[in-house]
């Protein structure tokens, strides 16, 4: 397998083609952005940690029957994945109120929600990834109602598995964002990453934030938090 031209560069990752048209290489960068890239940083080990954490989580989800794009980890920064067409919707799940939802609705951060809350955002950096609803998504041609049903079900299944996994790590899964894509057969599968960049993770005993909020809110110890998540994940998964 050979690494070809760069197909795409995002804020935290690059994607390269390979000699197989159905497979691409994802490279995790140390760059961090927040608030639609108005805030920028760079953290040693972040790319390596997100590659390693995403690898462990996607492998685990695969064993639980969740279809993902993940094929294999190639080295410290890179993984081989199935090529997909990313559906331009961010699926956000909230088990506790935090972040933009706390701000938008004037609710205190840290309240556990009695229901699982799903937000849909339209992936458009130039618009700041606006919050939309199902009807907007269908109007935009991003997905059909039937596909949205399937996407919510898959996202909910992933949430159930991850709540349990993080619980074993003594961590509360506050909220997270995933991206889904369609593979060469049109099947909807999990793509992108699941890492402290894309989740809010609070230590159950201390409520310490072990995720990208340490960067967003200038709390310090960003790399240490990502390493902590990786270490706990390895221990629980016996890797
Ligand atoms: P929010 O509270 O800012 O809407 O974020 C909800 C969750 O989604 C949080 O775990 C961070 C994650 N997220 C991303 O991964 N990428 C994004 O662009 C945004 C806005 C949120």
Image: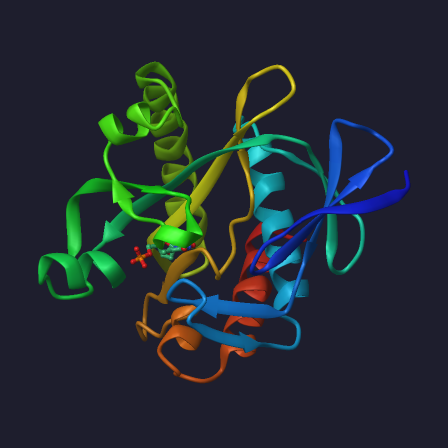
Q: Nearer the viewer, residue 87 or 204?
A: 87
User: Residue at image x 52%, y 64%?
Assistant: 229
User: Residue at image x 60%, y 55%?
Assistant: 53
Single out the residue that lies furthest toward the left: 106
Residue 149's place in the image compared with 137, above or below, is above
Q: Nearer the viewer, residue 108 or 203?
A: 108
Q: Is residue 176 visible in this depiction of the protein?
A: yes
Q: Quadrant of residue 234?
A: bottom right
Single out the residue that lies furthest toward the right: 2
Q: Quadrant of ligand 1?
A: bottom left
Q: Is residue 167 visible in this depiction of the protein?
A: no
What x and y, as percent, mark residue 143?
Answer: 39, 23
Residue 91's place in the image compared with 36, above or below, is above
User: Residue at image x 56%, y 16%?
Assistant: 186
What x and y, as percent, mark residue 194?
Answer: 51, 50
Taking the image as shown, residue 215 lies to the left or right of residue 64, namely: left
């Amino acid at each position: 397998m050979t690494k070809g031209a760069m197909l795409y560069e995002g804020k935290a990752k690059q994607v390269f083609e390979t000699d197989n048209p159905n497979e691409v290489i994802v490279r995790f960068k140390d760059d961090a952005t927040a608030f639609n890239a108005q805030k920028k940083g760079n953290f040693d080990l972040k790319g390596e940690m997100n590659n390693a954490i995403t690898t462990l989580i996607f492998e685990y989800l695969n064993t639980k029957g969740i279809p993902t794009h993940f094929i294999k980890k190639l080295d410290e920064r890179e993984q081989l994945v199935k090529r997909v067409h990313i559906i331009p919707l961010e699926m956000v799940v909230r088990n506790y109120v935090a972040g933009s939802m706390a701000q938008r609705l004037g609710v205190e951060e840290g309240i556990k929600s009695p229901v699982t809350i799903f937000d849909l955002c339209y992936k458009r950096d130039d618009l700041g990834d606006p919050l939309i609803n199902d009807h907007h998504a269908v109007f935009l041609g991003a997905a059909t109602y039937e596909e949205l049903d399937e996407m919510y079900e898959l996202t909910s299944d992933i949430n159930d598995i991850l709540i349990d996994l993080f619980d074993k790590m003594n961590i509360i899964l506050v909220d997270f964002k995933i991206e889904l894509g369609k593979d060469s057969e049109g099947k909807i599968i999990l793509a992108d990453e699941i890492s402290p960049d894309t989740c809010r993770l609070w230590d159950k005993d201390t409520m310490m934030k072990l995720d990208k909020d340490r960067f967003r809110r200038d709390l310090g110890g960003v790399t240490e938090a990502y390493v902590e998540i990786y270490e706990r994940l390895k221990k629980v998964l016996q890797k």
